[in-house]
Image (cartoon, rainbow, N blue to C red):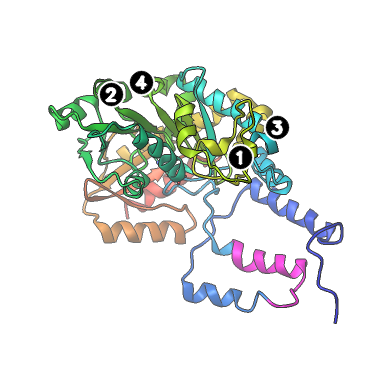
Amino acid sequence: MDAPRPLHGPDAFPRELSGRIADWIDDRLAGAPLGRTVAPSEMYPLLEGAITAEGVGAEAAWDRFTSTVAPNTVALDSERYLAFIPVSPSAAGVWMEAAVGAATFSAESWLEAAGAVAAENQTLRWLADLMGLPAQAGGCFMSGGSIGNLSALTVARDQCRPGQRVVACADTAHASVFNSMHMLGLTEVVVVPTGDDGRFTGAALAAALGDRTDVGIVVAAGGSTNAGVVDDLAGLADVAERLGAWLHVDAAYGGAALLLPERRHLFDGIERANSVIVDPHKWLFAPEGSCALLYRDPDLAREVHTQHGPYIDVLHGDEPLWNPSDFGYQLTRRATGLPLWFALVAHGEDAYRAAVRVALHLTAAAVERLEAAPGVSLVMPPSLGVVLFRRDGWGRDEWKAWGERVLREGIAFVAASTWKGEPVGRLVFMHPRTPVEVIDQIVATLSD
Ligand SMILES: *Cc1c(COP(=O)(O)O)cnc(C)c1O
């Protein structure tokens, strides 16, 4: 019997194949094909028998990946992906992501990964400065906005005084906010309805609460996911302050717009938040799996999230070290802030500002063309990179058919949405290389 193939060491993987994989990554970074989505009945048979006792060898396994796995996915990184929230990682970010995976920077603790943690903290400080958070603010990078919201809201819950465990948020809050409240046993929620502009304001919160004083947590959006609306953070901070409540700002999608002087005013008040999240894997062009979580007072998070046990207490030395796992619900942790750090160091803040701004130019172009199209109207003027629009006479079925057609014709990947219960079209601009012709092609599909 042959010896099993070695998993490790210099003979574990053919060098020639590593080169081919690097080429595949470079090709992907040059421009990702839109990809496709398939039915389970078509997909699973393609993988049948792939896992065997002896293995097929790295070349054959890679061929299986490139022929069956990769093509049967939709490319969120495509220039023509305009649905949900795209992920448009920078080339530098992708290569650092590969290096981070290879090096296994286990960045839960300072002891194990001082270099990685310090670089991540430098990046968190950069974000905190954009927000105007005080010098002691800090936190960690996590895998995404959902776990970031859960981690922050856990700390918020533990700060609630007895009789003050009610949460207030808007009807536009992200699904993960509602799921987090459920997981945290925060059963009482005041869901404040937003008006036609989709904006959660301090005045609306005050009106909804009347003379209630039992609200201990206020959740605001720094760019709602469905419509890209930034809530009235200053007004909400006023109400939260009056109540002695924790203000959490979910800027997972929109936080990147803090970089733009022409949009910065929308975020006034964010400097008063007790916790904030921003997803670098959204509009800050990091590869998938990155959320920046910041606390105004990180010590409060430490009390909640530090994990104790006989074999990990050594991580907490005599002098307090910065262990990212003390600030969110995750122990073993990939250094998911390093790709952003690396790309920022390489390209500089100005390059980020320019890249983020492209989405606003594309959005403005879409607004102009949609407004000119017969039978088409905007739901609201967009404030960030999300456009919601109506088409006379179109309901759920027409919008569904529209999405399928736009993909089938290779124009773009789009997904319809609803606004206050009404089916509407939705486009999200993010990739700086999205050609403006895509907008014309999409607008054309609305007229016939
Ligand atoms: C995307 C998003 C989330 C969830 O983030 P994930 O990284 O997908 O877990 C939370 N809140 C808002 C506003 C978002 O846009």
Q: Do the residues bearing badges 4 and 3 touch, measured as CB atoms within 8 Å? A: no
| Residue 3: x %, y % from top left | 85, 74
Mark 2 or 4: the one toward you: 2
Return the mark for residue 115. 3
Q: In the structure shown, which secondary structural element does the residue marked by tag 4 occupy?
A: loop
Circle 2: element type: loop
Report the amino acid beneath label 2.
Gly
> Which disc is residue 313 wearing?
1
- Spatial distance from mark 4 to mark 1, Cα to Cα? 38 Å
Mark in the foreground, 4 or 3: 3
Could you tell me which residue is drawn at 73 percent across and 45 percent down? 103
Considering the image in quadrants, where does the N terminus appear?
bottom right
Q: Is residue 128 left or right of residue 118?
A: left
Pointer 4 residue: 269
Label count reads 4
Sooner in the amino-acid sequence: mark 1 or mark 3: 3
Q: Return the residue at label 2.
A: 244
Percent of width and height locating residue 161:
28, 31
Residue 34 in sight from this viewpoint: yes
Q: What's the distance in space between the residues labelled 4 and 3, CA to CA?
A: 33 Å
Give the x, y percent position of residue 192.
Answer: 21, 37
Q: Amino acid at mark 3?
A: Gly
Amino acid of disc 4: Gly
The span shown in magenta is 52-70
Q: Establish if 1 lies above or below 271.
A: below
Distance CA(mark 2)–CA(mark 1): 34 Å
Where disc 1 sits, the SS reads helix
Does residue 25 appear to the left or right of 162 in the view shown?
right
Q: Is residue 413 above or below residue 244?
A: below
